[in-house]
């Protein structure tokens, strides 16, 4: 074994080949399966079922040819194809490992075919020696977790591995290379893979075994004959869609939290009377912003990504707090994301998708004014998602933030808190001041009526997501200036620590 471990499954070596039908029977069933797949299109759209189909396999195994057969009768408005390169681009390398795959997620009601996905990058890292065992295990954990999150959130994930033998692969590569119109399709990687077939087989077996799960199993396709391979894929695909449509509305078990949590006070126990002297505020603001400015250049040089997340009661002072942070930063190295209600194309995907899309690259800072925590607050209380959805989200959020910190990001989460009387005074001031009226909406007043319900949801959120690797920092903001200085001190300390660690 590659890692010296006992393999659980030998999916390739032990898979039992289904008997290939006669040419006439194959042609007849192919037409029937295509028609069945075509008929599923409207049902998938009505059920808002997103279908993610992953094609992996040996070089020259015919993935492209099979894809052409499968999509032949699908309306092009209902599917798209993502051709993933084995190696990320220099720009993609500055984002988390999963980034370039997750931004390609299909919308609800549509198909997305992946011509290779995360498997090729991971097995390639093993085979070329750039991955340690720890690297490999971490990537496997990320993949398994992500596939589980997707299926829990209503995705159908179907994974096909196209299997051919060493001699068959060599024959196909030779045929492609000898034709000037197809020689470009054979690269050094394909030739190396064939020469080291047994080594590659061992690594592929390990990967398939490690990522084979009941909710997202692997299907091994006998790809010696391309028409037969296409029929096998169609059989599994139509069967999988049929099952998914029947089970699409079922609730998913809530996973037990396995992340280390730190104690955090309930909102009612906070001391909101904390203040700062105006003179001290000016001096501290100047000092801390100066230090933050220097740290920004250092973290850029050391390629440390930073995610700063702001949540809080309406009118608590998030905007002014953010302004004092960004006022110290080089505008070329940060971006502020004001998060509003999701757009239709965002609602049609996994709720974390729109935040994956907004992550910073290494050396840059992303500030989120409202965040992924909307799932367990406004979406929970306003009925924009099911109870099963928001109950699962605590664990999914912890997994998301762990992925970010494992990548090397500094993750800072601020809860900005005021009391009900202070909010009322600020709402009234906004309403009565023309240049501030844009800050107050009817929705703000409606949310105020649910203060107690929001406080209950917030307390649960803080208790369940105050992890040791991404803890919450509460900013007492009745005195906005006090909250600004406290936030700056926390940011400066965290970035100083990260820069020192990166030396």
Image (spheres, helix red, strand yellow):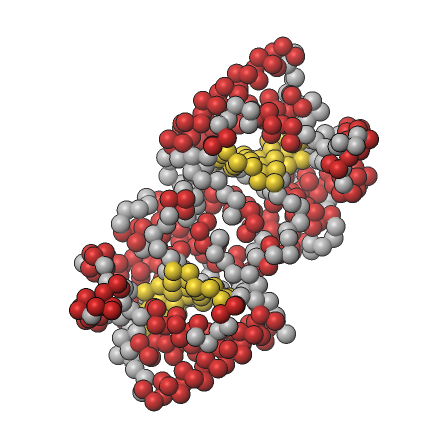
Compared to residue 401, the image places residue 271 above or below, namely below
**What number of labels is visible?**
0
Percent coordinates x, y for residue 494 in the rendering = 49, 73
Percent coordinates x, y for residue 464 in the rendering:
38, 58
Q: Quadrant of the C terminus?
A: bottom right
Give the residue at the far front of this rendering. Answer: 434
Q: Which residue is at a point 82% across and 31% down the rendered structure image?
A: 178
Q: Give the residue at x 53% y 27%.
A: 237
Residue 82 placement (x, y as % from top left) = 57, 40
Task: Examine the image and state in which quarter residue 483 appears.
Answer: bottom left
Name which quarter of the figure residue 47 lies in: top left
Q: Work out whether 171 lies above or below 368.
A: above
* Camera sees residue 258: no
Q: Is residue 104 above or below residue 25?
A: below
Which residue is at the far bottom? 279
Q: Is residue 442 visible?
A: yes
Residue in the picture at 55% in, 16% down: 31
- Name the residue nearer the viewer: 281 or 126: 281
- Image quadrant where residue 317 sits: bottom left
| Direction top: furthest residue | 24
Q: Would residue 421 appear left or right of 43 to someone viewing this image?
A: left
Frontmost residue, 496 versus 210: 496
Q: Nearer the viewer, residue 396 or 73?
A: 73
- Residue at image point 38% right, 63% down: 369
> Which part of the image, by quadrant, shows the N terminus?
top right
């Amino acid at each position: 074994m590659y890692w010296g471990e006992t393999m659980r499954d030998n999916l390739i070596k032990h898979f039992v080949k289904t008997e290939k039908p006669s040419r006439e029977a194959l042609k007849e069933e192919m037409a029937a399966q295509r028609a069945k797949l075509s008929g599923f299109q409207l049902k998938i759209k009505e059920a808002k079922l997103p279908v993610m189909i992953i094609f992996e396999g040996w070089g020259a195994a015919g993935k492209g040819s099979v894809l052409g057969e499968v999509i032949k009768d699908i309306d092009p408005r209902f599917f798209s194809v993502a051709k993933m390169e084995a190696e990320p681009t220099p720009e993609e390398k500055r984002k988390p490992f999963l980034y370039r795959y997750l931004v390609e997620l299909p919308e609800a009601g549509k198909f997305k075919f992946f011509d290779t996905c995360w498997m090729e990058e991971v097995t390639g890292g093993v085979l070329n020696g750039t991955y340690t065992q720890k690297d490999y295990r971490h990537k496997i954990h990320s993949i398994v977790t992500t596939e589980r999150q997707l299926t829990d959130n209503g995705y159908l994930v179907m994974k096909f591995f196209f299997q051919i033998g060493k001699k068959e692969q060599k024959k196909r590569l030779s045929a492609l290379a000898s034709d000037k119109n197809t020689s470009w399709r054979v690269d050094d990687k394909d030739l190396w893979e064939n020469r080291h077939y047994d080594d590659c087989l061992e690594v592929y077996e390990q990967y398939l075994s490690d990522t084979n799960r009941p909710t997202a199993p692997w299907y091994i396709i006998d790809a010696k004959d391309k028409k037969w391979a296409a029929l096998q894929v169609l059989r599994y695909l139509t069967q999988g869609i049929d099952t998914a449509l029947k089970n699409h509305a079922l609730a998913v078990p809530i996973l037990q939290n396995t992340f280390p949590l730190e104690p955090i006070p309930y909102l009612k126990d906070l001391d909101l009377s904390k203040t700062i002297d105006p003179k001290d505020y000016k001096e501290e603001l100047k000092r801390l912003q100066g230090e933050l400015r220097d740290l920004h250049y250092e973290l850029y040089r050391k390629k440390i990504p930073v995610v700063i997340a702001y949540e809080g009661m309406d009118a608590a002072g998030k905007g002014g707090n953010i302004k004092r942070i960004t006022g110290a930063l080089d505008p070329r190295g940060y971006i502020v994301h004001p998060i509003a209600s999701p757009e239709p194309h965002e609602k049609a995907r996994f709720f974390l998708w729109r935040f994956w899309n907004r992550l910073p690259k290494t050396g840059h800072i992303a500030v989120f004014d409202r965040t992924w925590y909307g799932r367990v607050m406004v979406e929970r209380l306003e009925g924009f998602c099911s109870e099963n959805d928001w109950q699962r989200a605590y664990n999914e959020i912890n997994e998301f933030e762990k992925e970010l910190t494992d990548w090397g990001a500094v993750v800072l989460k601020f809860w900005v808190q005021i009391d009900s009387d202070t909010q009322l005074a600020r709402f009234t001031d906004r309403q009565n001041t023309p240049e501030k009226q844009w800050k107050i909406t009817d929705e703000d007043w409606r949310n105020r009526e649910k203060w107690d319900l929001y406080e209950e949801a917030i307390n649960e959120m803080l208790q369940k997501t105050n992890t040791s690797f991404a803890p919450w920092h509460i900013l007492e903001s009745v005195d906005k200036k006090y909250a600004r200085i406290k936030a700056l001190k926390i940011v400066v300390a965290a970035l100083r620590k990260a820069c020192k660690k990166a030396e």
